[in-house]
Image: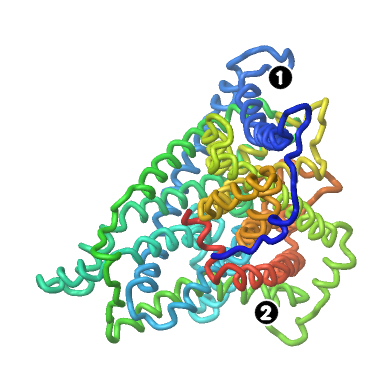
Amino acid sequence: MTVATPSLATTSVRPVRVGGFDATWLLWIAIIAVLLFLVVSPFVYLVVTSFTAERTGGFTFANYGVAWGRARYVEALFNSLRLGVVSAGLAGLFAIPLAWGVSRTNMPGRGFVRMLVLATFITPPYTGAVAWILLAGPNAGWLNRFYMFVTGSEAGPLNIYSFTGLAVVIALYSFPYIFIFTSAALELVSSEMEDAANILGAGTWRTMRRVTLPLTLPAILGGLIICFLEAIALFASPAMIAIPARFNVATTQLFQFFGNPVRVEVAAAYAMPLLGVTVMLILVQRLMTHRKGFVSLTGKGGERRPIQLGRWRWAMFGYAMFVATLSVFLPYLFLLQAAFAKAWGRGFALDNISFRNFHFVLFEHATAAQSVINAFLFAGAAATAGVIITLGVAYIVTRRLVPYSGILGFLCIAPFVIPGVVLAIGFYAAYAPPPLALYGTALILILAFTTRFLPIGYVNNSAALRSINPEMEEAVRILGGNRITALRRVVAPLLKRSLLGAWLLIFIPATRELSSAIFLYGPGTKVVSVMIFDMSEEGNFEYLAALALLLQVLTLPLLWIGQRALGRDFMLRRIAT
């Protein structure tokens, strides 16, 4: 790549110095201070709070006694662990055949299937949970009503308000993690190894089971671990399904500790094992997916040809459409029906169609429209702050500007191992009390969103900076500029597309973030995810569906921009990093 910089050759730019000190160091110090404020301080406060007596402020283990002194509290944690195992297993059943079909075979519609996986991935889990309540609610759910109509039975077979129902819903909206990890690994497997198995008498299916998938086993296990962690960290789906089903999981139990009165010390103590499990499994997952050579390559990566499935390719496509029906087609069909219905239970009758729900949430509801505006404003601020902070940290780390700079990179990645509810409790403990007293303000939500998605920005910016030759920046410095000039005049222009991608990758999930927002919002700072959750508790499914669809529609232009600038898989690629 050739970069013309005539202005640098003709303009003398001198370093900015204050008393002989290069002022760029003030920027690095500020970035490091902000990173400590966002990541280290809430975590330290979380641990300290778990050992702090509520009344005296002294050191105590009593919070742990309260947090783990009741059988139902312990049972909630075991329910979460069991839910994680079952959900991850089901997600693997959905994802692994799809990944093999898309990456290694001549299955028709492979691009279409990838698009459907993306549609699943960008669907908020709580929206999927609401859709499945409409579909599989006992007796009133559409699938149960159809079954009763066909068979004449008095009751339907499905009950979403059960452990199995919750596990299926979580699996349907977390399987893209396994899909991306597995498909990325499958695309590296050389066809020569499969050819060797075929020469020795193995058929297509046996080769897939005995050769292809074992080579990608570390990636599959890594994806399963991410799905497990997603399941135990989710709040909205369990709150909508598990609480009516009368069983608790760890996240809903944490939410109950924030009832009246708020017991943040007990919540902090209860969060510690959840955090420990998450950290341990993330370390295992990183070791697995960063192993070198778990797929064997020959020559320049080996030749990779699609496996010819014959007439079975249509069976493979049928399975893909079955999964898409469960995760995309049926949920969105009945969300649309509810959004445009006067009463969702009356069905698709013409006299039941109305735009009333959209008019109500946009113009009549006291806070619904404002919650959408809040979500986009807070997400925009968080994305901008996240990109700036992670660009600065990535630059410090990749250029090794300070001693032990790798620690800064670790701190940027650290929020990935902290579940959203645990992070929110840390922010509450650190910044809700005086002197800052930020609880319920827009600032605490922006800070929490920024921290929550720092890993996305850092991974993207770090990878982009490693692709830029440092000699280009040195040329600026030789001509009299400092590092800020190099960043502004050389690095930033070269990274425009990457910075846009990092901003979108933070902004889109931040608009629908619930697990941290539910603990930190105030009366004037409610965001759309919290509004949707409140409407689900009130049973206002028509208004809820309209609001959820508005959120999805407003996201589509951003996806289009990202796909035009960065490629069609830009949202999915982030989970394989």
Label at residue 54: 1
Q: Amino acid at mark 2?
A: Gly
Mark yes or no: residue 423 visible: yes
Q: Is residue 57 left or right of residue 463?
A: right
Depth order, front residue of 363/337: 363
Quarter occupied by the N terminus: bottom right
Q: Is residue 144 above or below residue 287?
A: below
- Residue 109 placement: quadrant: bottom left
Mark yes or no: residue 37 visible: no
Q: CA distance from mark 2 to mark 1?
A: 52 Å
- Marked residue nearer the N-terminal end (2 or 1): 1
Depth order, front residue of 62/564: 564
Residue 50 x, y percent position in the rendering? 62, 23
Q: Residues within 10 Å of mark 2 (few under 14, many from 20)?
A: some
Q: Is residue 212 left or right of residue 525?
A: left
Disc 1, SS: loop
Residue 3 x, y percent position in the rendering? 61, 63
Disc 2, SS: loop
Q: How is the image coloured?
A: rainbow
Depth order, front residue of 24/447: 24
Residue 265 x, y percent position in the rendering? 66, 25
Q: Residues within 10 Å of mark 1 (few under 14, many from 20)?
A: some
Residue at 51% across, 32% down: 273
Label at residue 347: 2
Closer to the eye: label 2 or 1: 1
Q: Is residue 3 above or below residue 255?
A: below
Residue at 74% across, 41% down: 520
- Residue 125 placement: quadrant: bottom right
Q: Amino acid at mark 1?
A: Glu
Q: Is residue 365 above or below residue 445?
A: below
Residue 159 x, y percent position in the rendering? 53, 61
Q: Is residue 253 above or below residue 179?
A: above
